[in-house]
Amino acid sequence: MKKISILLIAALLLSSCVSKKKYLALEQEHGETKNQLVKTQVEKEDLENKFAKIQARVDRYNKKINSLNEDIEDLRIENDIKLDVNDDGTIISNDAKRKMIATLEKVDQEKLANAKTLKDSMNLALQYNLEKTMHSSDLNNDEDIAVNINETVVMISISDKMLFNSGSYRISSKANNILQKLADVINSEESIDVMVEGHTDSRSINTEKIKDNWDLSVLRATSVVRKLQHKYNVDPSKLIASGRSSYQPLVENNTRENRSKNRRTRIILMPNIDKFFALMEAN
């Protein structure tokens, strides 16, 4: 009995020693884990600080790049709007010059070979645009309408009978078709100024409302201008009305047929160079 008690006490002491050993081992492992966690946290904070410094450097570089890009864009814009004054006195911006060159690539090379100055080249570009505009219309298809393109000016001569009754400045209803075609041409080209000229024959006229051929020619021109503005929405800032009376006849006023030829309204389409190149710069 005494022997059994001694063995039991020995077993309990041995068990106690094993448990304490495991406890110390676990405590040591916990300490190591805690140290590792602290070390990891320190490394994490160190990496975050380094990343923040790198990000700050990247932001500074990006700011410099953006600033350089803005400077480059400002220089490009400044260069585009820079005006060149050429030997012939012609003034043109670099941007407009580039666009004019693009237009001239479509021009007949024989015509282009004869352009000796920048002004010649500008005129060719204007002429090309005007011809393209006129060819897209069907104004040339009417026998009572004569169209002539002289360098950069288009002259459209419309017979009196197409627009007015004899001795009157009131536009007849039969004029609607031709005025619509004319307005389409004018409205299709932003850079055109339009002069409307009234021409009469040499026979004198004197009525209650019309004093002479000067009156008649001017009244006819203003009637056409008003119609283009109010009915066909042509910008009035493009329009000029003038009367030439009977002093620029096409032929002698010695026959009825000739007098009929002299009674006409001439529409002159004149490219406005400032508008033309402003339009090119806007495109």
Image (cartoon, grey):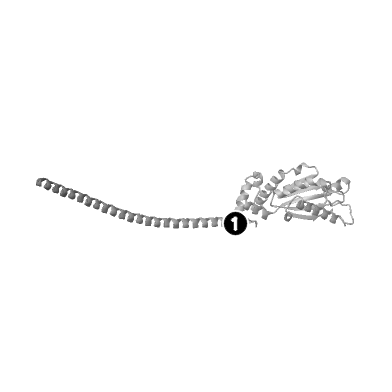
Q: How many marks?
A: 1
User: At label 1, which amino acid type do we have?
Assistant: Ile
Query: 220 or 63, which lies in front?
Result: 63
Residue 13 falls left or right of residue 242: left
Find residue 14 and report its horizontal and vertical position in percent. Answer: 16, 48
Find residue 49 and report its horizontal and vertical position in percent. Answer: 37, 57
Label 1 Cα neighbours within 10 Å, binned few <14 / some 14-19 / many ≥20 = some
Tell me what residue is drawn at x 76 percent, y 47 percent: 180
Judge whether 92 appears above or below 135 on screen: below
Tell me what residue is drawn at x 78 percent, y 55 percent: 241
Tell me what residue is drawn at x 29 percent, y 54 percent: 34
Query: 82 or 111, which lies in front?
Result: 82
The residue that mark 1 highlights is 81
Find residue 274 and report its horizontal and vertical position in percent. Answer: 67, 55
Residue 89 falls left or right of residue 174: left
Is residue 77 visible to the viewer in this orientation of the structure? yes
Residue 138 falls left or right of residue 82: right
Taking the view exactly as shown, the residue that stands out farthest to the left is: 2
Tell me what residue is drawn at x 18 percent, y 50 percent: 16
Residue 177 picture quarter: top right
